Structure formats: structure tokens, C-alpha cells
Image: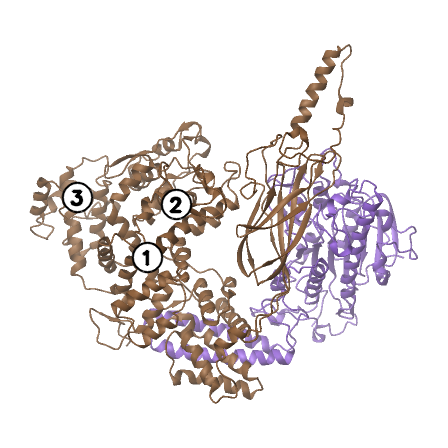
Chain colours: A brown, B purple
Amino acid sequence: MLDGMDTRTALTVLAFMSSSAVGATVQPFLAKNCYACHNDQLKTADVSLSSLKSVSDNPDLWEKVATKLRDGTMPPKAMPRPPQAETDAVVSWIKAELSRAELASKPDPGRVTARRLNRTEYNNTIRDLTGIAFRPADDFPQDDSGYGFDNIGDVLSMSPVLLEKYLKAASTVIRAATYGPDKLKPTVLRSQPPGREFPLIPKALTDYDLTGLSMPNALHATMRFPADGDYDVRIALEGRRPNGSEPLHIGFWIDGTQTATLEIDAPSDGGSIDLFGAQKNIRTHISAGDHWIAASLLKLYEGLPPSYAGPNPTKRPVPPPPDFSRFLKIPEGATPKEIDDLKRKQSERIELNKVPANRVWVHWLEATGPFNVPINPAAETRKKIFICAESEQGCDRKIVSQFARKAFRRPVSAQELRPYLDLVASERKSGSSFDEAVGAALQAVLVSPDFLFRIEHVEKAPAINGGSPIDQYSLASRLSYFLWSSMPDEALLRSAEQHTLRNPQVLEAQVHRMLKDKRAHTLVENFAGQWLELRRLESVSPDREKFPEFDDYLRMSMRQETEAFFQNLIDNDLSVLELLDAKYTFLNQKLAEFYGIPGVQGAEFRKVDLAGTPRAGVMTQASILTVSSYATRTSPVLRGKWILENLLNEPIPPPPPDVPALDEAKIGAAGSMRHQMEEHRTNPVCASCHSKMDPLGFGFENFNAIGQWRTKDGNFPIDASGTLPDGRVFQGPSELETLLRKDKSAFAECVTDKLLTYALGRGLERYDKRTVHDIAKKIEADDYRFSKLVIEIVNSLPFQMRRGEPNKT
Amino acid sequence: MIITGKHLHRRTFLRGIGAAIALPMLDAMQPAFAAVTEPPVRLAFTYIPNGVTMKAWKPATTGADYELTRILQPLERFRNDLFVLSGLDHHNAESLGDGGGDHARAGACYLTGVHPKKTAGADIQSGISVDQIAAKALDSTTRLSSLELGCEDSRTVGGCDSGYSCAYTNSISWRAPQTPMPPETNPRVVFERLFGDQDFTLTPEARARKAAQRKSILDLVNNRAQRLAQDLGPADRHKVDEYLTGIRELEQRIALAEKDQHQFTPDMETPAGIPAAFSDYVKMMYDLQVLAFQSDATRVSTMLFGREASVRTYGEIGVSDPHHPISHHRNMPETIEKITKINTYHTSLFAYFLEKLRSTKDGDGSLLDHSMIVYGGAICDGNSHSHWDLPVLLAGRGDGQLKPGRHIAYPKGTPMTNLYLSLLERMNVKMDRLGDSTGQLEFLTEL
């Protein structure tokens, strides 16, 4: 704690630290610089420091004091500043005291409230329990989020609507598992993006995306196909082609691979070929699940009349252009030369208004099906559940107890099983078949609170440190829902049964195994997706006029870049610091062109070196830059806030009411955004937060609202320099990234905080701070590697233990 | 108890139930002394886009003995139940100086009689449509004031026809001049709006068995949760309490539903989504309208076979060209033949609707007896985009207020909106004007 200070400061601090009572040490400093406003009478900002005793009395308040002193937001700019050495000393003292108080405080593992399975967890659990891949929870109401994640026990609620859906889902799932999935009637999936405007390009281009995949004329959609089977895909166009053009070739892609080409033609309506409504269909096999479907025009600039000077002009006869000269008003006494001139000007005008070469696009796409669904007699799924034949004695007990053990994620006693077996018996008495009767009991299992909630039990042992270790089954569940968002597999359950799971070597081996399993992809989708706010990418709508190049393909690609980056981090067990400043990323052709990086071709994502570019880490990935902007412009405030909340763990309180809006029209015209916002920070009250957020955001102003590099904001050159509240300066994003990387421990603590929250399913409290701090310190020794972080979290007090219950009387 | 014009509301003792269950008319609810019951009059509109081949539509003679034309042939069994009306115009769908955009104007004008404002932006302006006027008068009488259905996806953003906003072609129903009522195109959503989430495919015995099983399951988990709650700390117990409350409410709903002996069972299963074949799609949407009328969920509905300028192809009848381009037939016989095929196909689907309405009992007659169904569009010839002498069919008896079975040709210049005034009159809604109307339409009741 005394590192990095000069001798004079160090001596001052030592002097302060000779006593922990406020009266003798820090009080002179506070009296001189703080009491004038923060006393018991004035209580400015509802804070009084004059009657505080030791730090452990009110740690929250002291922490605030330290933060504001360190950031330089207190004393406010208008007041005289104390010498930096004194401020530093006081901050260090407070921090030391806080640490001491936290270390001295009783270790408290905290307590997670019983968590119900959220939608993702429900779908995954059903999949792993029954082998059936359909997703009943997609019909469930949205889950509530808290602390940035949708798996927080306290926040997830249960409504009658949800219960009814659980009941229905249980019935559908068990029926499908026993008899096979319901035969689906073919239905229509449709994608029709909003209308487009294309710039008029009357001449054929020779250099363009020949595959058409990245062209604005393409249609991209993610469609959810209900079952494996044949689908009738119908593609419809809109637009016009000049008379005599050859038929158009439409490419059809599934998940980035072209699987078909269709030829579409249409007759001329006299003036041009009208393709509005021209459509064609193909039948193709598509598997169940979400697929990226794309359709676009191949060879868009080919097959045009020769006058367009494009490659491979049409071989069809091109009718002569209509003679409009009869509409020409030739004035009296015009000379032949003047008449020729007029005729020429008219043809030039007509030439300009001729159908541009690029004016056709995919209007909508429909997929109808499934047809020819392979009818699985559900042999596989049935076998998993109906493990014995009806004729066998006690078969019903066998089936139900195996299913319940897996569903409840723990052993089930005979007493607990009794009501389920009674249900089987009574169903049989009223005439149900064996399958139906057993099915009823299995449905009850899926609606039981033991399935829907993750209820944790503790080992039968005296409590230590106010908490008890959770039992091995609860530990197995915590592990699997943390890393896989799903139920524990057989290996985990067996390890719990044999009481070996808590063994550190076993635990570590399990973590490594689980991280390598493809189910760990849920960490990317659910943890990174929420932590980095990637999910918001689905709903942003950048202004079409300002950002015409933003289409669904770009949106999809942006998300995939960040996901691939994170997946790579997990797969190769890299340092989490890579998130801050990795000089590489994962791009496809669309995104590479968007970033201005040459040499990347094709739709697959591959690792690309970012040396020589201003980009590094996640902060400069288009996904992050887009979700932290508005639809029409960047927002340094949003970006600064994003960094503070998600990378430095310093959340900003909401703005005070009655803040007037920025005059949007002036931005870029009367002054750059930066200039406009400077004006708003002269107020010291606003400045207390904005001096933290704005400089960070301004550092990234070179990236526009959809993450492209720019050097001008309207008419004004970008000024991407800034000063952090503690006085450090930077010029542009690279320098800012370097400064942020210096705060290694702050970032490490932030990632730990977020991952621990996600792992525990509860918000972190003050008593967790030491856990976070300890973990961040421990992983430093191992270069902040991801697996190390996970293992430390799994071994931590709150993950392994639970606070005892208050007396129930 | 004196029964006035409104008989005892059938929903009187169903208040308080959360489920969407309705009763058909029960004998006990009929007025004690009146011999004639007064079932409500229903109003429905079906819209066909892009015009028709008038030569194959309009019968040569008027009166009751008119000869059925090719396009009207599929409606032969219903000739006594419907009117063929010719000579009606939508003057306000003409360009009137606004240039191109006849499809947008047609769609916007059809039920409003108003010349819509030419704009592709947010400042759209049409009128109030006849169905919404009827719906407003019935507000709070039926659970849904009206139903808007469509068999073609709406286009969401931007311009759709020569500078007119897509809002003008997406909907024909307008609640207010700036408030179009977007049609629902997914039959599953419509079904769930009308009947909730239940499974009607099983026989009554199977449903009873399933209900008993469900009850047993809920009992089991309820007991389990109660025992569990006793062992938990306060925070966890709160969660399980939420669960128990949910179970309790669910059990109550189910119990109430079972007590109600005259449960209305729609005779169709829950649609999965939009059916693959167009005829199945249209029939399903018509089935839903019949059920909606039968259960009195609503008395007013509109449906679009397609939006104006629809580009649907009809491969099932051998027409694989998109509809709109071929409606510009340029007087070429093969193209005209294709259009006529489409028109005939459409009327055959309309016949399905009439069949269902006629065979559904309603009070002392059929639903068709108590309905007024309009079929047609606001474009006559798709090639020239004409808006006069429109194709119009009016089916049903409106509870004795219509005497169909004739072809009536009205004098040139008769506004279509006069028909609407007459229909509203028969629903007890008195209007002075609707759009460009000049008065009521004659001859609908007299012979």
C-alpha cells in the first residue's frame, strides 16, 4: 500500500497511521478541506463527516470519501485544493483502514436465495435430461434481470402464467419423450426487412462483392426451424432492370454456405423489367434450430445491356430506347445545331434516369415446412427414460426414481418417491396405460419445486465462520449451472455421490473438463453476452440515413466477432487482460471491410492481426461501440459509463432530474459533440460524475455510432484527447487503452466481481469484497488466466459455503 | 323481468373468470314472453386486391333471374343468400390530382370513403372506416370490439405505392383518421386471443381424464411445496410461496372451468402458425371468424385476402406469376385468363365462408341469416386502376333486414359509401354521412 509513493508522502502516511482513531490522524485534513460543507448543520449532499469515528463504523461512507478524493472530484474545482501528497496519504489511509476492517470482519459466505431455472437453463436442462432439443421455454415470459444478469435468485419471480406454461411444457416434453415429437403441420416462416433505398449507380461496377453476401441488396435473417425436414424456401425480389437484361441469379445461403442458386426472370412493362413480386422457390433440407439464412444477387452487374459497360453483357436483344424526341419542344427557327443540342441534352437526362445497374434486391423470404420429417419412433429418448419393461416387477419405481434423481439433481428417498408412485397407481386404476400412468408421474417431477428451483442444502456439520459447506450435490449443481447453464452430468453426480467433488484436485480437474466441453459455450452467450451487453445488439436500430451500411448481416457479424473473441479466450485459456488490449480479433469479410482491414475474404471468422490499426481489445469492437451509442450519434457519456461499469466496476448513479437535452441539430454543425458537451460540464454538480465519464468516452470519439473509424465529426476534426480525474492525460484511444491496462488490478477485480455474481446468482455485498480482492490477487500470479479465475471462484468461500439460517422461531 | 332490446347479457355470470370462455346463446337467456329472439347482427368484410375481370364478373341481366358468370359460379348454392351489386363507385380513390398511387388509395378508401393524404411519412390521414364505426357502437358489448385479419404480411416501413405510406395498403380498417388497425396474420395468435391456451383436440372423455390427471399432478406438487416451505429460511420460503400461490390460482381457474357445463368448445385445434397452402390459410381464418361470431366474442370483422398490390402467386391453380404484375394485363388474353382464374379461386374460398355461416345455428336461424357480409375491392379493372363500377357482393339477411337473391345495378355515380350507411342503419347506428355518401342505398330490403 505504500508502493509508488515518494518518501515524503510515505512518512506523512506513517504519521497518520500511528493511530486508527479519526480524531488524531485524518481529522486535521478533513477539518481544513471538508467540514466547511460536510458538517452536521449544513450536511451538504446529505453527508456529514464531522462526527465520524472510526472507519469500521461506516465503511460505505468512508469508501465514498476515498473514491472522491482519489478521483479529484472532491474538493470541488471551485475550492482550494489541498496538496496532492496530503490527499494521497488520506486516501491510502482510508483504504488501509477499509481493508483492515474488511479483513477483520467476520468471513461471511452470504446466502443465495433459491433460484428458479431461467429460460435458458430450463431449455438446456430439458435437453440434457431427455435428449429432446426443442425449447419449450421460448414461450415463457421474459426473465427479470438484476445486477446485470438474468440468473439472480432474488430477482427471478414465479407467476401463475409461468406455472401454467410449466405444466403445459411438462406435458409436451414427456409426450415427445415417450411417443416421439408431435407431427408438425407445415407453417410459414417469413422474413421481410424494411424497405431499402439504393444509391443510383447507372454504370456497372467492376469491383464488388461477387458473392453478393455482403451487398446491401442481400437479405439476412436468423430463422428458427421447428424440426429437421424439407422446407420450401421462396425468395421474392423487388426492383427493376433495364430492358433486355438477362435473368438474375439469386444465391441462397444457410449458415454462411451457399447451397443453391435460383434464376429469376420477369417481363418488361415497356420502360424496364419490373421485378416487384418476381419469386422462385426451392426445396431444401434444413435441420432444426436457429439458422442464418441469406439470399442475395450474384453477378449483379452482369447480364446488363452493353451500354452499361459491364462484364458479360446480355446476349438478349435489347430493344431500342423509346424515342422521346417527339416530346421535345423545338422552338421556332431553331438551327439544326440547336436541335441536335436539345436532343442530346434530352438523351443525357434520360440516360441519367435510366434504371441504375444495382436497383434490384431481395424483398422477402419465406420458408414453409417442415415436410417429410423423419419420424423417429423416439427410440433413443424413450430408452433413456423407460429403462425397463412394464412386465418387470417394480419397473415404475425404477423409472420414476431414475428420472427424479436426475431431475432433482440429488438422490431421492423412498419416502419422497411415494406420492409419485401413488400417482402412477391411481392413474392405472382409472384406466391409463403403463406409459400414460408413468408419464403422469414424470410430468409431476417436471412441475415439482425440486426441479424448478435450485434449492441448496448444507453438510451436516457444525457451522464454521457463520457458514456451513453446501452439500456435494448442491456444489455439483452450482458448478454445472455456472459453466454450462444446465444440470450436472453423470460424472458430476457420481463424484458428488462418492463425496469426492470437494477434493481440490478433483474439483480442478472437473473445471478443466467442463471448460473444454462444448456446453461451456453458454459462458459466451450468457455471461459475456450480458456482461458486455451484447444482447442489446439485437434491438439497436442505427439511423438508416446516417448509417446506410448497417444491415442485419453487419449486426450478426458484430456479435459474432465478440463472441468468437471470448470463445477463443476460453478455448486457449488466455489471460482476461486480453479483453483490454489484445492486438487481434476475429473477422469475416464483411466486418474486415467495415473496419478497413484488407485481405480478409469469405464469410468464415478467422483470427486477424490488428497491428497498425487503432483497435485493440473489446472496447474498440464494433459491437461494444454500437451498444454504447445512440441511433443517430455517438455518446461519450454512454461509452464512458460502459467502461466504468463493465470494466472498472465503478457504477455511476443515474443523472439528476431536469437535465435539458443536447441540441442534436447543432452537433457537427455549430460545434463538435465534444465542444457541445464541454459547455455542459462547467456546472460542478454535473462535473462530479461527468468528469469521470466524459473523458473516457471522448477517447473513443474516433469511432462513430456503429464503430467505424472517422477523423471528423460533421465539419469538425475529432479531438480524442482527455484528462482522467486523477490527472493522467492521453491522446487518442491507444493511449487510453494503455492507461487503462495499467489499472490491471482494477480490471481484474471487475471481471472477478462480474463472474462471481454470475456464478453465485446473487448480488455481491460488502463482505464479499475481500473474496473478490483475494481472487484477483491470486490470479495475478498465474497471469490472470481464465481457468485460474474460474477455479478460484469455485474454491472461494461464498461458492463453497452458505451462511446459516436465522432462528425460525 | 322486462327484456328490452338487449337480452340478458350472456356474460353476466361469467365475470371473474380469467379464462377466455364464452357461452353460446342458452335457452334460459331468451326473453320470457317474446316469440322472436333478437340475435345480434354481425358485420364482416372480405377484401380482394388488384381488381377483377369485370366481363367475367358482372351478370348480363339484373333481377332475381340473373345468369351466374364464371367468377360467380362457385357461389351458385348461395345465390338466394346474396346480392350482386354493380355500379357502385369509390370516387375518392381516384387520383384527383395526386398522381400515381391507386393501390394505396384503394386500400385506404375502401371502408372509409375518404381520399387519403399523399404522404410516405408519419403524417398519414385517412378517415374512420365503417367497421370501426360499428365496432365503436358495440364497445363494451362484446369482449373484442372488432377483429382485423389478413392473409398477407404487412410491409412495415417506408413507402409502398408511389409516395404513399405502407400504412395505407397494410390495413383497410381505420379507428381514427390517423390510426389504422393493423390486421393479424397469424391464426395462432388470433385463436389464442379468442380462446386462450387450451387443447380442444381431445374427446370430452379424454379431456376429462386429462383434467383429472392435471389435478392430481397439481395436488402432488402442492403438498410437496408446502412440506418444503416448512424447512426453508425466509427468503427461500418466499420463493416457494410465490410458487404455491401460482398453483392455487391455477387450480381455481381449472375448477371454475370444469363447473361450467356449457363450455364453448371451438371445433378446431390450436393453429400452429400460418398454414402452408393458401386455401388452408384462408379457410382457417374464416373458421376463426365464424367461431368469433358464434361465441359472440365480437360482431365485426374485416379480412384481407391480400394487400392492395399483392404479389402472391397461386401455383395451386396454375398461376405462378405474381398477382400484381399480371393484373396489369394490357388486354392480353392469356394474362386476363390468369387473373380470372385468381378471381374465381377467391370466390370459391368465399363460398367456404358462406357455407360455414349457413350451417352454424344461431338462435332460431343460422349465422348467415343474422349477418351482413361484404365481399369486394376498391379497384375494378387492375390494368387501368379504375375505381368505378366496383365488384361488390353482399351476403346474408341481416336478421330480416336484407332480401338477397338479386343482381341490382345502381345508376352511374352511386357511392359505395351509401351501402355502408345502409349497413350501419341495420346495426342501429345512424350516421348522416360516411366519406362521400349521399344517402342510403335503395332496394336492399324491398323486392
Q: Check disc 1 and report its element: helix, strand or loop.
A: helix
Between the residue at mark 2 and the residue at mark 3, the CA separation in whole angstroms equals: 51 Å
Pick whichever of labels 3 and 1 is earlier in the sequence.
3
Label 3: which residue?
A35
- Mark 3: amino acid: Tyr
Is residue B229 shown left or right of residue B271?
left
The CA span between labels 3 and 1 is: 39 Å
- A258 to the left or right of B28: left
In terms of depth relative to the viewer, which is nearer, B364 or B223? B223
> Measured from the top left, where is residue A166 in percent x and y?
49, 70
> CB atoms at circles 2 and 3 under 8 Å apart?
no
Looking at the rendered image, the disc whose residue lies closer to the viewer, 2 or 3, is 2
Residue B384, compared with residue A223, is above or below; it is above
Residue that mark 1 sits on: A755
Label 2, label 1: how many angstroms apart (C-alpha)? 22 Å
Q: Are marks 2 and 3 on the same chain?
A: yes
User: x%, y% of residue B380?
Assistant: 80, 45
Q: Is A325 displayed left or right of B223 in the figure?
A: right
Residue A602 disc label? none
Return the chain for callout 3: A
Specify whether residue A533 is in view: no
- Asked which secondary structure carries label 2, the reply is strand
Which x, y percent locates residue B276?
67, 59
Instruction: Return the disc, 2 or 1, that comes first in the chain's sequence.
Output: 2
- Chain of the residue under the numbered disc 1 shown in the image: A
Q: Is residue A234 above or below residue A321?
A: below
Circle 2 is placed at which residue position?
A: A585
Q: Quadrant of residue A232?
A: bottom right
